[in-house]
Every structure is written in C-alpha cells, then in structure tokens.
Amino acid sequence: MSDGKDKFILRSKVDSGAVSALNQLVYNRDLGSILFAGAGAGIGYALVFGARKPDFYAAMLPVIVFIPLWLLFRFRILRERVTETVIDMAEGTITITETKAFGTRTVSASAGSVRMIDVEEMPAPDESDIQDIVRWHNIAEPGVHARPLPVYRLVVALNDGTRHSVMSGISVESLLAERERMGRFIGLV
C-alpha cells in the first residue's frame, strides 16, 4: 500500500471466503503442491519403469521429476491470488489487476467513474457445510461447533454497474481505514 501525489497503489491477497479459509487449515498451497508433484512423479515412475526391475536411475526419476513439478505447482498453478489497484490521478485512470493461476484479468476505467467504495461482509456458508468440512477433516472434537470468522471485502463500484473486490480480510477496521484513504484520494469523501 503506497500513495504519492498522483498515484495510489493497493496490493492485497484475495480471500475466497470462510469455507475456503476453513479448508486451508488442512489443504494449503504448500501441501497441495507436494501432493500433486508426488502424484506426478509416481505416475511418471510407473509409466517409465513399471515393468522393469528398479535400478539406481529408476529410483532417481521420481526425485528428478518431483522438484520441477513442485516448483511448477507452487509458484505457477497454486500461487496466491493477488489484486493490485492503481489509481493514477495524473492520467485520470483506475486499473484493477487480479493475478490468477493462469494469467491476469485487468479492468481499466476513468477515475471519475468510481461511484462508491464500500466494505461488505462476504456471505457466510451454511452451518451444515461447515460441520461437513469439520467432520471430513477431523479438525475438531465431536460436539464442538466451528464458526468461521466473518470475512469482509473492500469493493469498488463503477458507474457502469460493475463491482470489483480489491481487498479482503477479517478486520473490518483495516478495510474501513483503506476505504477512507482511497475515498479521500479520489475525492469521494
């Protein structure tokens, strides 16, 4: 988060909501990358040396295949989603760029087309969904009800009716502070 005289830049990770956060207690990007790379290395070993007696080179194949696969999954396919919002008053533009697993999505508009900056609570999952996840992952004692923390997001609404989530988190105070800073910079407050 930085701002100068003519430019306001906000970079943040994008959160998928409460169910995703609960699932990430067990399956995070590191574990997912290890599982996928291990499966790829094992399948490669079985395809190449499945009918052969294993030797030193056959035993090294999974290690040699695992490392690049892990790097590919961790840093390209399962990378964190990041949103960057740039408001350039010198050019009179707002650019919202969301980095995804495969490429990026960019939305550009004039800075004057920002109708509203708002903080809203993301929809909470059903209680039954939460209990299913808790039971499936066996992360709580029986009878203990898990309630995820509410997740909030900072939304920029444009005059064309589109709404873009530019930041999320569990602290509504920090999002309100960012809304205030961004609104003051654009001149909405």
Image: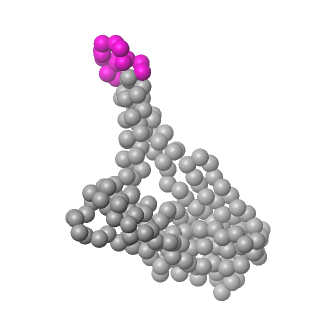
- Going by the image, does 85 lie left or right of 176? right
Q: Residue at x 55, y 49 (%)?
A: 101
- Going by the image, does 85 lie left or right of 49? right
Q: Nearer the viewer, residue 127 or 21?
A: 127
Q: Residue furthest front?
A: 128
The quadrant holding residue 171 is bottom left
Q: Residue at x 37, y 52 (%)?
A: 27
Q: Nearer the viewer, residue 4 or 127?
A: 127
Q: Is residue 186 above or below residue 94?
A: below
Magenta residue span: 47-60
- Asked if residue 133 can be seen in this view, the reply is yes
Q: Nearer the viewer, residue 77 or 139?
A: 139
Residue 34 in the magenta stretch? The answer is no
- Asked if residue 67 can be seen in this view, the reply is no
The quadrant holding residue 185 is bottom right
Q: Quadrant of the N terminus?
A: bottom right
- Going by the image, does 112 lie left or right of 9? right
